[in-house]
Amino acid sequence: MGRGKIEIKRIENSSNRQVTYSKRRSGIIKKAKEITVLCDAQVSLVIFASSGRMHEFCSPSTTVVDLLDKYHKQSGKRLWDAKHEHLSNEIDRIKKENDSLQIELRHLKGQDILSLPHKELMAIEEALDTGLAAVRKKQMEFHSMLEQNEKILDEEFKHLQFVLQQQEMAMEENAMEMENAYHQQRVRDYNSQVPFTFRFLPIQPNLQERM
């Protein structure tokens, strides 16, 4: 007994719908791979699930962009609007400018210049002279800045040395004052403990003459 014919309509049950999508997706991608190998065909397949997730397959011998370009040329349908065409033209322009700059850079490095006419060689020489002058000017500015920084650092070092010297002198003076004060206090303490008759008296050379 054969299988009954399945009615093609939306599957209401979300779980069954997801299972069916996964099986059918795998099957159609398998068919795309088979026709690519068996028939040497160029196939591009893009599938979007209801969740928004994308699945794709493209024949190894081509790309999706190349196939879209072929489709655009053969069908005559416009796949891109004016905005996309403007962006595409802008990308082409930037690529051309980049290629031109790469050629100029090789010329400035002395590469691929054997076939250049005399006028272009003179222009390259002038550009190199201008660049060399700018580099030398920048180097002079850099050396001048270094000398100025060294001068500032030297002045700051001298100022710090002077401040340190002043602080050392002040500390020495404070130490001497503290030492003198200490000795004076020792003398006062000693005199306060010794009887008056035994205290040291100042030398008076004329005392005997007065007696």
Image: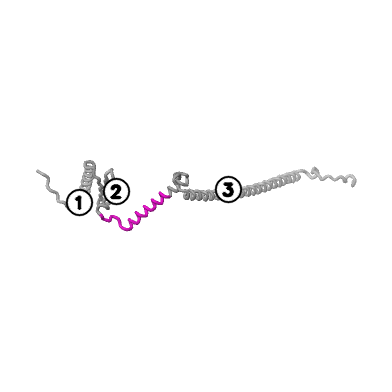
Residue 13 image label: 1
Instruction: Please name whichever residue, 157 or 177, is drawn nearer the observer in this view of the structure.
Output: 157
Q: Position of residue 181 (x, y in %)?
A: 72, 47
Picture coordinates of residue 154, whole percent (x, y): 62, 47
Whether residues under marks 1 and 2 lie with C-beta atoms below 8 angstroms apart, the answer is no
Q: Is residue 77 magenta?
A: yes
Q: Amino acid at mark 3?
A: His
Residue closest to the eye, 34 or 17? 34
| First to last magenta residue range | 76-100
Of the two numbered discs 1 and 3 on the same chain, state the one appearing first in sequence.
Answer: 1
Mark sitting on residue 143? 3
1 or 2: mark nearer the eye: 2
Q: Report x, y in % for residue 190.
A: 74, 43
In the drawing, does residue 172 fall left or right of residue 102? right
Badge count: 3
Residue 47 in the figure: left or right of residue 198 = left
- In the image, 134: left or right of 208? left
The N terminus is located in which quarter?
top left
Q: Secondary structure at mark 3?
A: helix
Label 2 to label 3, Cα distance in Å?
56 Å
Give the structural element (helix, strand or loop) at label 2.
Answer: helix
Q: Nearer the viewer, mark 1 or mark 3?
A: 3
The reply to whether discs 1 and 3 touch (Cβ–Cβ < 8 Å) is no
Q: Amino acid at mark 2?
A: Asp
Q: Nearer the viewer, mark 2 or mark 3?
A: 2
Q: Main structural element of the magenta stretch: helix, strand or loop?
A: helix
- Label at residue 66: 2
**Mark 2 nearby-residue class (10 Å; few <14, some 14–19, many ≥20):** few
